[in-house]
Image (cartoon, coloured by chain):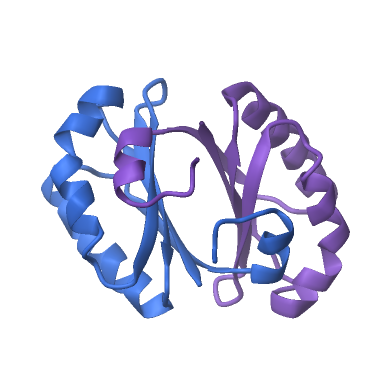
Chain colours: A purple, B blue
Amino acid sequence: MYLLQVDFKMEGPFGEEMANSFQELARSINNEEGVIWKIWTENEETKESGGVYLFQTKESAEKYLTMHTARLTSFGIRDIRGKIFKVNEALSTINHAPIK
Amino acid sequence: MYLLQVDFKMEGPFGEEMANSFQELARSINNEEGVIWKIWTENEETKESGGVYLFQTKESAEKYLTMHTARLTSFGIRDIRGKIFKVNEALSTINHAPIK
C-alpha cells in the first residue's frame, strides 16, 4: 500500500464553506483508480490545505498526483508539495493504522 | 480531529529491517496522549521516511510533534518537516476516511 501526502498554500475556503464547495470533487475522487480513502486537511491559521490518501499501488498514486497537481495549478494554487511513500505495514499495524 | 504529518531524510533502515528496529518505539506510541493511529511511511529511493497520525485534539498533536522532533533530532535526523491540520470531516467522510 502507498500513501500520498499533498499540501499547499490556500486562501480558503475552509471548514463548512470548503465542505460545501468541494462535495462534487470529493465524490469524483471515489472513482479515481486505486484510491482507498482520502483525509481532507486544512489549517485556516497558516492558510494551508491538502490531503492524505491511501492507494493500492504506487502507479495509481503517481498517476493521481500528476493529475491532481495539474488541477490544483489550474485553480491558481502554487507551492504544491506532493510525496508518495510506501506504508510500512508491520509497524503501522502495531499503531492501529487503517490500512486493511 | 487533527492530522499530524511528519517527514524527513533518513539513510535507513527501511522495510523489514525498519520494522524490526522500531517495534518497541511503535508500541510506546500507543501510550502517547491523544494518538488514535499512526501510519509509518518510507521511501527507500528518495531516502525519506515519516508518519501520518490521527489525534483527538490539536493540543495532543502539538505536544507529540514537539517531543517527536526532539527525539528524531537526538537520532541525528535533520530537515524534519511536521505539519498539523484540522480534518475536514464532511469531505473526508465522502472519501471513506478512517476517522471514526
Q: Residue at x 79, y 55 (%)?
A: A26
Residue B90 lies, in percent from the top left, at 71, 70
Q: Quadrant of residue B12?
A: top left
**Left/right of residue A26 with respect to residue B57 in the rendered view:** right
For image coordinates 55% across by 57% down, the residue present is B98
Instruction: Kindly tell me whether residue B72 is visible in this rendering.
Output: no
Quarter assignment of residue A48: bottom right
Q: Quick one: A17 or A69, which is closer to the camera?
A: A17
Residue at 70% over, 54% down: B95
User: Percent position (x, y) of residue B2?
Assistant: 48, 69
Q: Where's residue A51, x and y in %?
A: 62, 53
Residue A41 rendering spot, x and y as whole percentages: 60, 62
Q: Residue furthest right?
A: A24
Residue shown at the point (15%, 33%) measured from the top left: B21
- B34 shown above or below B70: below
Residue reaching furthest to the front: A100
Horizontal relation, residue B44 to residue A5: left or right = left
Q: Is residue A50 above or below residue B67?
A: above
- Quadrant in which the C terminus of chain B appears: bottom right
Above or below, comparing residue A75 to residue A62 in the picture: below
Numbered marks: total: 0
The residue lying toward the viewer, choosing from A45 and B5, is B5
Q: In this rendering, is residue A13 above or below A7?
A: below
Indicate left or right for A28 with A49 as reference.
right
Answer whether residue A100 is visible to the viewer in this image.
yes
Quarter assignment of residue B91: bottom right
